[in-house]
Amino acid sequence: MAGTNDLTFQEFDDAANLLAANPDATTINIGDPEDSSGKKKGLQSREEEDDLLGNEDSDKTELLAGEKKAAPFWTFEYYQTFFDVDTYQVLDRIKGSVLPIPGRNFVRLYVRSNPDLYGPIWICATLIFTITISGNLSNFLLHKGEPQYHYVPEFRKVSIAATAIYAYAWLVPLALWGFLSWRHSKVMSMVSYSFLEIVCVYGYSLFIYIPTSVLWIIHSEILRWVLMSLAMSLSGAVLMLTFWPAVREDNRKVAISTLVAIMVLHVLLAVGCGEYFFDQPQVDLTPRLVTSIVSTTTSGQVQSH
């Protein structure tokens, strides 16, 4: 034991003398080989663990992406994602369509995270029935009690309303999506929207007409035009604030023409529905004319005799 201690102290003295003679000399620690190998093994095991986790996450991502792409378009799972929305999201989007805020894009704020078809489809269906029922009820209340007026429910207006509203909510977004995609290929800095996002914007923008069509039952032309103007302004503002970022990088004439076309179609829908479904029907005057002609002929014959 004493000899071992002397050899150890002698090694330390030799090392101290070498460092004093050459301070720049490098030293190697060979005292704890197990610790250094343990650290290296620990680092390697952590790296391997991270690699495994990373591979596992990437595998999960690929599997999820594969599951989304695997569903064919004729299956129920393919369309289920379009209706994967809860009540709070729908109400939030309805509120955003009724109260547009300048500087806030409806798509980026409400739709882009999870565009849906649930809200647009049911909003259009509800608007079809409210505008048809309100129009029939308005005409009935207007001529109630008149002997010349015979109320007949106009069920054909349901199909007319469905054709007009669904054509506006689907064909106009389709044409707009095609146009924006074509312009985006020419101007790469333009903001691009998907077809589903555009349909979502148009569908939710029609919600304001549901309460408006119910209030159109009131027989006041001034009130009707005020309500129509208010509804057109709110829903039109949603469309303008949404599609202006998509066209502002384009040619100035093209951008303005696109926004004007959007507003013209929007105004045509509102004014056309108001004038067609809430126009006062003409009272059938044929019985009155026949009666007057018969009475005039009869009185003339009596006078001649």
Image (cartoon, rainbow, N blue to C red):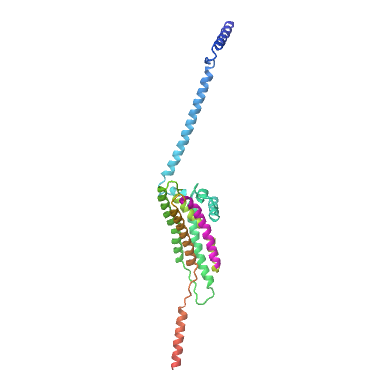
Q: Is residue 208 visible?
A: no
Give the camera-side residue of 267 and 206: 267
- Locate residue 85, reporting x and y percent: 51, 49
Q: Mostly what secondary structure, the magenta segment?
A: helix
Q: Which residue sits at x=46%, y=58%?
A: 260
Compared to residue 222, the image places residue 72 above or below, namely above
**Which quadrant of the figure has residue 305?**
bottom left
Position above or below: 279 against 31 = below
| Magenta-colored stretch includes residue 268 | no
Residue 198 lies, in percent from the top left, at 46, 52
Residue 160 lies, in percent from the top left, at: 44, 64
Give the position of the N terminus as an image quadrant.
Answer: top right
- Give me the residue at 55% from left, 64% from top: 226
Q: What is the residue that sits farthest to the top in this orientation? A: 3
Say if residue 51 shows up in the picture: yes
Tell which residue pokes out farthest to the bottom in this image. Answer: 305
Q: Position of residue 242 (x, y in %)?
A: 49, 52
Q: Give the range drawn in magenta.
A: 222-247
Image mark count: 0
Residue nearer the viewer, 247 or 232: 247
Q: Is residue 245 magenta-colored?
A: yes
At x 46% / y 36%, what residue is drawn?
Answer: 58
Q: Residue at x 48, y 33 (%)?
A: 54
